[in-house]
Image (cartoon, rainbow, N blue to C red):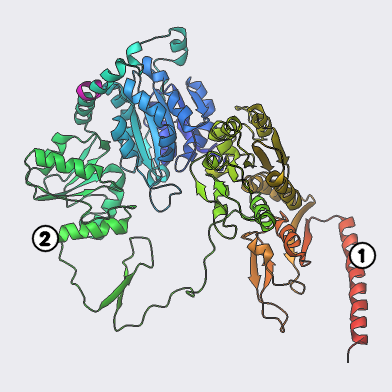
Amino acid sequence: MAERSFVEEVKRLRLGAGEVFSGEGILAVTKALLESGVAYIAGYQGSPISHLMDVLADAQDILSEHGIRFENSASEATAAATLAASVNYPLRGAVTFKATVGTNVASDALANLASGGVTGGALIIVGEDYGEGSSIMQERSHAFAMKSQMWLLDPRPNLPSIVQAVKVGFELSEASHTPVMLQLRIRSCHVHGQFVAADNVRPQFTIQEAMENPQRDVSRIVLPPASFVHEQEKITQRWPAAVRFIEERGLNEFFAADADDIGIVVQGGCYNTLIRSLGQLGMADVYGNSQVPLYVMNVAYPLIDSELLRFCEGKRAILLVEEGQPNFVEQNVAAILRQAGSLTALHGKDVLPVAGEYTTAAVLQGARAFLETYGRLEPVPAAPVVRKIIPLVADASFAPITVLADAPSPRLPLDASLQSRPPSFCTGCPERPIFTAVKLVERELGEHHISADIGCHLFSILPPFNLGNTTMGYGLGTAGAAALNVPAGKRAISVMGDGGFWHNGLTSGIANAVFNRSDNLTIVVDNSYTAATGGQDILSSTAQNPTRSTNHAIEKAARGVGANWVKVVRRTYDLKTMMGTLREALTTAEKGPKVLIAQSECMLNKQRRDKPKVRKAIADGKRVVRERFGVDPDTCTGDHSCIRLSGCPSLSIKTNPDPLRTDPVATVLDSCVGCGLCGEVAHAAVLCPSFYRAEIVSNPTRWDRVSERVRGAVIGLLQARAQRRLERYAF
């Protein structure tokens, strides 16, 4: 069950020539693939292209109508290797995954593909997850394109440019016999707009034809001596062919090229940000008409020397807007200008940030400095009375707030002593009790080395759990603790999710642990989906998927590669069972790798499925019972173990109603989904009696109403008797 359904949106993919397509960037990419005559598509989900995989999954009927093979690949390496179909056959193929982590996983296949070259167009659509909103290490796809000499497209973030990039990407690949990377930044993936559609096209050469007429060219296989020839081909044949194609088709764009004797060179993906900045400075209008000459590189690699030199001719200086580091493009441009003897001054990261996301605020500052230097803007007078500049807002459309030395400091919106809540698991997440159990067991057995992994469970490294020593990559939790296997008083603990298990963990983790006779514990968090990437189905998903094979147990796979100690906890919210199984795994005398599979469905997906059903049932007048938990403020001890060992967003504190007690009491907010963990934690930690479970009955029956009246009467009698007893002893 994916995070978002595109069933309605994909209907637009049937639009024909001349019709206007309106929608999101991800949908536009899918439509462009259909219009390009692609024969097969594969990929692995991950931000910011998860929705592309979801769109393709929802559009399988359209793909099938056009004879297009689509696969949800087991990993990025699997997806990249799929492009082997384009090596010997004129099959157009596309794969997609998250960059740069996905590119790293796929690197072996991509490097071999780039070495031998392709016959059919091979397009790698990478979601460039770079910037402060990213969840990964800050690297760029540009380095990989340079390393393997694959051409890198970085189109302007608007639908016509993105669609054009997809189409010419296939053509460029075929013209130069080289795989092409199409870089889609986060904003490009989710930008909305329009373009004029063309007819969808069936592949000119089909997969069936390839299978019935197999072709073989040993010179395309990466083995000596062919591999030595491949390097020469890249430089003497493929590169010149790519440069010719890029120049002849005008893939890079010039705007107001002769309007001034200074100019700006920008990567296509940063174009909108630059125009926004120039607009703030009064140097461009809302339609993108710039007073400053612009050279927009929709092809980020390779650089086209002739175009760059033509743009720089007669210009005193240029500003290069290159997001991220190292400054590959700036170094390349400097070399081109130097070798050509150009006198044009080059500015880049001397006025722009050396590293980090190029937000409008960052580009605005650099562009202002550049334009002031060359007299296009009046310098902002430096005010010696300025004490500091506080960026209270992230949006560059607002100017920073300047504080004068003789003016009072602005009042911060929150008390400086107030601690922010770190990002954590969703309300009711079934992974929370796993790490609660680990914390409670560590109270008995001491702290353990914990090797973390990519996925929602990585939130356990933050408060309130503070677990996890390292994380090495998706499905590499067990491998990350491989060295920590010697006789000792404690066993190392590794964590991986079910998505990571099938992606990489089964072989790199469990099988490797069996082979090397590891004695450590691996916890496999099985929530039925690849929850971290949007809830897509995997082999072990319990849902019945009409186009995929599911319900394959992780337990059987682990035992199949030789693991003997394999335990399954069917309900992670059962804290006592979780603790008991963990304790056994960490203390048993049995040698060999231990695998604990902790199962409960992802609460987000469960709520997405159940809430519409509940709303409909209530609207239809049916009896519906919902569980909620609460805290009795009169009996709350103020220990707050429920919060410290849970961190649930629905748990908070409020003022103690007892005037003689100053400690705040715990309270349960309305966002509670009734998982019951807070009560379990409180009892496991301090035997707290303050938690209660309540049932909210919608559309109650006559029996429900009678029962409620009887319960109310009995409780009233008991309360009255207790009150009389207190009055008897009152002075």
Q: Position of residue 480 (x, y in %)?
A: 52, 42
User: Which is the main secondary structure of the residues drawn in magenta?
Assistant: helix
User: Residue at point 61% right, 43% down?
Assistant: 487
Near mark 1 (Cα within 10 A), the count class, few <14, some 14-19 or many ≥20, is few
Question: Which quadrant is home to the C terminus?
Answer: bottom right
From the viewer's side, name the closer residue of 434 and 304. 434
Mark closer to the chain start, 2 or 1: 2
As drawn, 205 above or below 595: above
Question: Within the image, what quadrant is residue 213 found in?
Answer: top left
Q: Is residue 43 magenta?
A: no
Instruction: Please give the label number shown on residue 375.
Output: 2
As drawn, 639 above or below 84: below
User: Residue at point 44% right, 34% down?
Assistant: 105
Task: Determine whether, in the image, residue 329 is placed left or right of residue 13.
Answer: left
Q: Is residue 260 visible?
A: no
Instruction: Please give the label number shown on residue 371.
Output: none
Q: Position of residue 256 (x, y in %)?
A: 16, 46
Label 1 amino acid?
Val
User: Residue at point 52% right, 51% down?
Assistant: 469
The residue pinned by badge 1 equals: 710
As drawn, 670 above or below 528: below
Region in magenta: 233-238
User: Residue at point 52% right, 66% down?
Assistant: 420
Identify the element where label 2 is drawn: loop
Question: Which quadrant is home to the N terminus?
Answer: top right
Label 2 amino acid?
Gly
Task: Determine whether, in the image, residue 491 is placed left or right of residue 405.
Answer: right
Q: Position of residue 266 (x, y in %)?
A: 24, 46
Task: Determine whether, in the image, residue 709 is placed left or right of residue 425.
Answer: right
